[in-house]
């Protein structure tokens, strides 16, 4: 008998709590490194992901005036993410909780019972299917004449172990085309961040860069890939929140179907050019006739690039403002609310800032500074020089700025020498 087919009676379940939700997982999985070999997948470090997803779904409901939501949790694991949504988001009227693992679906039912959710007037369906099969069945149902009134789901979440690339095409066939919400996680960060560049070319059809701002480059490669698959399905996407934490990227994207707007959105596709001599970087669009053969700052020809990728905005101001307000409300009982507040603040700050960032510790090391200024002092000095500057959520020891890297290093030297 396989490990996953043993009955629950043969295994010890342990009850845990996250926010206001209780749930069981297998005791032997508690201290395990998250992997596919677990009885039922659960990752404690993804609590922040689940926290922000609760806020994002509620914020989406309010901002887009969605009174009755249909939510698909396509890779639910223990079901804790879906349970927290059911307990916190009143507008969810239908929930499909899916996982291909038979032990997971049985555990999900047990966890729903534990939280008294099966007696609520909400349609909850537990499903055991491959996510692509589930999405294609939803799409097929919407095409059937007898189901012409069938409404595609408003929100779909995919949270795979590794890359989400296998599921994106069928995802767009299943989602509501008019302001649907996609919640997509990628945990294959070594691929997206340029540690495994060949794998990135294979999986995302883009060249990464392993440099000081590789986390942002990776997020932009992922958004570009998803947007291009959306275009193939006659859809476009708008990133409303992009964040990185704990070796994962989580995207919240809104769908739209205007072909005119889709074409305009393609102006967000391009490349990042990076000078390996001085560290200067900048974005260019898809017009390869305007190619750059020298660094615009130092004149060096030792250039590298990343892309194609998304060179547009990563966040939508009104959405982040909305979920930031929700995060301050006590009824969500979010353990990581202060950490989330910091992330959202930095996301707001970086909305109108250029692509890329500079790690202050790295710069100080390069110029042999013995001391490192505080972020507030450095940002204030940059702004006094007439440039923009902000923190970034991608790296709490880095800044985004319109000041070029040579001028920034000179400023750091001045601060080291006490020159005002």
Image (cartoon, rainbow, N blue to C red):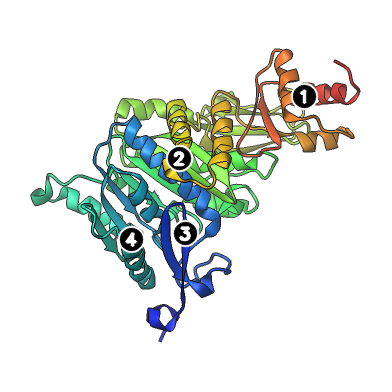
Q: Which mark's residue is nearer the viewer, 4 or 2?
A: 2
Q: Which mark's residue is nearer the viewer, 4 or 1?
A: 4
Residue at position x 38%, y 68% in the image? 104
Residue at position x 45%, y 53% in the image? 164
Category of crowding for the residue at label 1, using alpha-carbon neighbours closer than 10 angstroms: few (below 14), some (14–19), many (at least 20): some
Residue 258 seen in render: yes
- Say which residue label 4 marks: 98
- Could you tell which of marks 3 and 1 lies nearer the N-terminus? 3
- Say which residue label 2 marks: 330
Secondary structure at numbered mark 3: strand
The spot of residue 116 in percent (x, y) is 30, 60
150 sits left or right of 16 in the view: left
Residue 5 seen in render: no
- Say which residue label 3 marks: 17
- Could you tell which of marks 1 and 2 lies nearer the N-terminus? 2
The spot of residue 297 in percent (x, y) is 74, 23
Q: Along the line of sight, which residue is nearer the eye, 33 or 266?
A: 33
- Say which residue label 1 marks: 408
Residue at position x 37%, y 28% in the image? 263
- Could you tell which of marks 3 and 4 lies nearer the N-terminus? 3
The alpha-carbon separation of the residues under discs 1 and 2 comes to: 41 Å
């Amino acid at each position: 008998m396989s490990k996953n087919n043993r009955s629950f009676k043969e295994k010890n379940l342990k009850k845990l709590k996250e926010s206001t939700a209780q749930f069981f997982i297998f005791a032997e999985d508690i201290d395990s490194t998250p992997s596919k070999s677990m009885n039922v997948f659960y990752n404690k470090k993804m609590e922040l992901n689940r926290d922000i997803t609760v806020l994002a779904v509620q914020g989406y409901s309010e901002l887009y005036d969605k009174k009755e939501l249909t939510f698909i949790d396509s890779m639910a694991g223990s079901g804790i993410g879906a349970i927290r949504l059911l307990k916190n988001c009143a507008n969810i009227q239908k929930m499909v909780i899916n996982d291909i693992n038979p032990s997971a679906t049985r555990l999900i039912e047990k966890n729903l019972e534990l939280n008294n959710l099966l007696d609520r007037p909400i349609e909850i369906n537990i499903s055991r299917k491959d996510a692509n099969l589930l999405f294609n069945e939803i799409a097929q149902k919407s095409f059937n004449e007898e189901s012409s009134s069938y409404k595609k789901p408003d929100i779909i979440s995919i949270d795979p172990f590794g890359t989400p690339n296998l599921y994106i095409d069928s995802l767009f066939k299943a989602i509501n085309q008019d302001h649907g919400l996609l919640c997509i996680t990628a945990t294959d960060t070594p691929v997206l961040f340029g540690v495994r560049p060949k794998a990135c070319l294979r999986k995302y059809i883009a060249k990464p860069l392993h440099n000081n701002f590789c986390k942002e480059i990776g997020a932009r490669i992922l958004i570009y890939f998803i947007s291009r698959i959306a275009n193939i399905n006659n859809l476009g996407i708008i990133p409303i929140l992009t964040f990185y934490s704990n070796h994962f990227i989580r995207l919240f994207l809104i769908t739209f179907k205007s072909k005119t707007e889709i074409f305009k959105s393609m102006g967000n596709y391009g490349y990042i050019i990076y000078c390996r001599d001085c560290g200067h970087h900048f974005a260019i669009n898809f017009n390869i006739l305007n190619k750059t053969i020298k660094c615009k700052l130092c004149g060096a020809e030792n250039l590298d690039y990343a892309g194609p990728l998304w060179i547009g905005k990563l966040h939508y101001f009104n959405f982040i403002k909305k979920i930031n307000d929700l995060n301050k409300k006590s009824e969500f009982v979010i353990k990581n609310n202060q950490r989330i507040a910091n992330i959202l603040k930095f996301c707001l700050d970086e909305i109108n800032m250029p692509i890329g960032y500079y790690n202050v510790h790295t710069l100080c090391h390069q110029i042999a500074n013995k001391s490192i200024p505080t972020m507030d002092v450095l940002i204030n000095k940059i702004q006094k020089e007439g440039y923009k500057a902000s923190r970034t959520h991608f790296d709490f020891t880095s800044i985004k700025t319109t000041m070029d890297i040579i001028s920034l290093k000179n400023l750091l030297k001045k601060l080291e020498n006490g020159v005002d």
